[in-house]
Image (tube, helix red, strand yellow):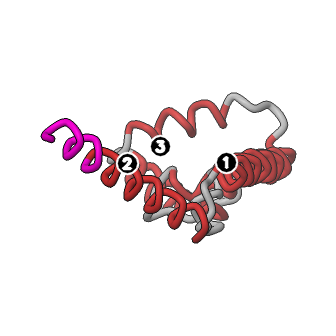
Amino acid sequence: MSDNLKDILSHLSTEIDQETLLKYLQGQLTEEQKHEVEKTMLASDFTDDALEGLKEIKNKERLSLLVDQLNRDLRKKLDKKKLRRERFRIKDQPWLFITIVILLLLIVLSYLVIHRMMRT
């Protein structure tokens, strides 16, 4: 999976990058930049709800650490799921396909033999 899919804040808005969002939440943007960010966020209810939740965090300096921790935890979970999927995936095994074809041929031949014996 690409790292962009694993990034928590990258999906809040496609027009606003993560660094701008963090600066907005920490109050490090000018009034004009804040207005532009808010104007962009109005288009998405999800972004608005997410930022309201992020604003509830009291210690804004720890916000980037929390984001990094969330990203790290998300990557761990996704990697664990990927590993589990790969473990249970049927690998390409040519002997398995050959065995299945032989069994099918034997079943068809048995049917034909039994059918002919019943005719006579």
Lateral position of residue 47 relative to residue 84, left or right? left
The residue that disc 1 covers is 88
**For the magenta stretch, what is the residue range?**
112-120
Whether residue 26 is visible here, answered yes or no, is no
Q: Position of residue 119 (x, y in %)?
A: 13, 40
Give the mark nearest the N terminus, 2 or 3.
Answer: 3
The residue that disc 3 covers is 47
The foreground one among 11 and 89 is: 89
Q: Position of residue 77 (x, y in %)?
A: 74, 45
The residue that disc 2 covers is 107
Q: Position of residue 91 (x, y in %)?
A: 63, 62
Lateral position of residue 19 relative to residue 72, left or right? left
Q: Tag 3, which secondary structure? A: helix
Residue drawn at point x = 50 percent, y = 62 percent: 16
* Mark in the foreground, 2 or 3: 2
Whether the magenta-drawn stretch holds residue 113 is answered as: yes
Whether residue 110 is visible here, answered yes or no, is yes
What's the distance in space between the residues labelled 2 and 1, CA to CA?
Answer: 29 Å
Residue drawn at point x = 44 percent, y = 64 percent: 15
Give the residue type that dot 2 points to.
Answer: Ile
Give the class, few, some or many, for how many residues have Cα within 10 Å of label 1's Cα (few <14, many ≥20). few
Give the mark nearest the N terminus, 1 or 3.
Answer: 3
Give the residue type that dot 1 points to.
Answer: Phe
